[in-house]
Image: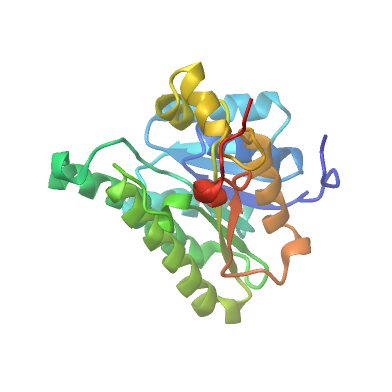
Amino acid sequence: MRTFTPGLLKGKTVFIAGGSSGINLGIAHGLAEAGARISIISRKIDKVEAAVAELKAAGAEAMGAAADVRDYAAVEETLRATHAAWGEIDAVVSGAAGNFLAPAIGMSANAFKTVIDIDLLGTFNVLRASYEFLRKPGASVISITAGQAVNATLFQSHVCAAKAGINMLTKVLAMEWGPAGVRVNAIAPGPIADTEGMARLTPTPEAEAALKAVIPLRDYGTKQDIADLAIYLCSDSAKYITGAILDCDGGSSLGRGLQPAKG
């Protein structure tokens, strides 16, 4: 059931990096349903075109382009095109990410660098390049982070480092951009159903059941849960929230001390 007012974001322009699949495409659909115009970028043009077509089929006003978040000039060009088409950008979601499981000793320096470059440098590029085109005051900037930013996780040294950087970048930019009326926050999704990440982490029913047993709410979240939080952060209801890292994880970040469900 929808928890937001239809048309809540009507007339607003939202730019989403990494918006062609997964959680980010779910955010795009949610924001579009709330009335926003959606501009997405991703590395592969075929995925971008498919996502834009999907959004338009659902009734959204949407556009997209291929760009690698590691390429500042390419990101800036797509933001400029969005601004030329629709005017000032009201919200930016930076969600491009890379991940794989590997112990640090078994990971090459280049593999570590790849995740840092996509997640952390990519987030900086999207946020920094967007500033010129944001509505000031009134814009909302959202980065997608993860619980690994604050919870050390085996075989995730690269992700832990990258997401911790995103969290601190969020806080610093909230301080620097606040006087201009730009709010900067981050969402940390927990286990979300029907995503590539969860398919990799829990490939069997037994693995899925074991993880759910230590989540306080005993279930995975949905892409709509993340979209609803993004809608809130983009709305005037969140006009006094900035520098926040908001967990949307069913309490899974608290689950280290939780006993598995019995029976």
Looking at the rendered image, the quarter that the N terminus falls into is top right
Q: Residue furthest right?
A: 5
Placement of 242 over or under 262, stated as above or below: below
103 vs 37, left or right, is: left
Task: Point out the image quarter for the C terminus.
Answer: top right
Q: Where 90 falls versus 41 (above or below)?
A: below
What's the colour scheme? rainbow
Percent across and percent down for residue 120 are: 35, 56
Residue 129, located in which quarter of the rendered image?
A: bottom left
- Is 224 in front, or is 250? 250
When the figure is inspected, residue 68 is found, relative to residue 56, above or below; the finding is below
User: Which of 147 and 21 lies nearest the eye of the viewer?
Assistant: 147
Q: Where is residue 161 in the image (x, y as percent from the top left)?
A: 32, 56
Q: Position of residue 48 (x, y in %)?
A: 48, 31
- Percent position of residue 252, x then y: 56, 45
The image quarter containing residue 140 is: bottom right
Please name the residue shown 50% across and 33% down the image: 20
Furthest residue in direction bottom, as rendered: 179
